Amino acid sequence: MNQQIIEPDAMLRVAYEDHDSVVKLICELVRIPSRAGTDPYGPVLECMSTWLTGHGMVPRRLPAPGGETVAMVCEITGGQPGPRYVLDACLDTAPFGDEAAWEYPPGSGKISGGWLHGRGSCDSKAGAAIFAHVAARLVPVGDQLAGSLALLFDVDEHTGGFGGARAYFEGRDAPDR
């Protein structure tokens, strides 16, 4: 984005400052079932939209050619021309599988012994929460950035269709090539 080097100690301080908020958002997302092809995606999209809006961003839903929502997109545009960076994470998840095999219910978002339990807690929903926090840190300095940062939260990844990514990268939002 810009060429200024950020000191590692400053990055670590920011990570520590955001830790509790990141974990809280992951827990909220994990507690909303969003299994591909099984659960409605509206609740998980609304949760993320509310968080992003509350942190000064303007998310919008991205439809597939058929009109169904397949992703949420949010962009921070810099004050200077430059490349667009895209952070992509999915908000849909794989099926729960045998729920009796889980130590805690897959939608629990329970923290036990320093571990966060639940479907999406260590991959897709964790990534989305981290990316949202990175973007929130950039909002106040957006005018100093060269280029832009887009958040892409796909809800058609675990179907195998990758509809959010396809709609974004093949649609009107496609980054310059």
Image (cartoon, grey):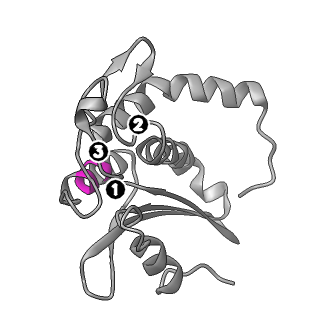
Which circle marks residue 92 in the picture?
A: 1
Q: Closer to us: mark 1 or mark 3?
A: 3
Label 2 vs 3, first from the N-terminus: 3
Q: Residue at x 32, y 88 (%)?
A: 65
Label 1 neighbour load within 10 Å: few <14, some 14-19, many 20+: many
Provide the residue designation for mark 2: 121
16 vs 81, nearest the viewer: 16
Segment tinted magenta in the rendering = 44-48
Amino acid type, label 2? Ser
* Farthest top residue in view: 113
Marks 2/3: CA distance?
Answer: 12 Å
Q: Residues within 10 Å of mark 3 (few under 14, many from 20)?
A: some
Q: Nearer the viewer, mark 2 or mark 3?
A: 3
Spatial CA span between label 1 and label 3: 12 Å
For the residue pair 8 and 38, the one nearer the viewer reads as 38
Q: Is residue 108 visible?
A: no
For mark 1, give the secondary structure. loop
Q: Earlier in the sequence, mark 2 or mark 1?
A: 1
- CA gap, disc 2 to disc 1? 12 Å
Residue 68 percent location from the top left of the image: 24, 77
Residue drawn at point x = 37 percent, y = 61 percent: 58
The reply to whether discs 1 and 3 touch (Cβ–Cβ < 8 Å) is no
Circle 3 residue: 96
The vertical placement of 63 against 140, above or below, is below
User: Which amino acid type corresponds to the residue marked 3 in the rendered image?
Assistant: Phe
* Image quadrant in which you'd find residue 35: bottom left
Crowdedness of circle 2 by 10 Å Cα count: few (<14), some, many (20+)?
many
Kind of element beneath mark 2: loop
Residue 61 locus on image (x, y percent): 31, 69
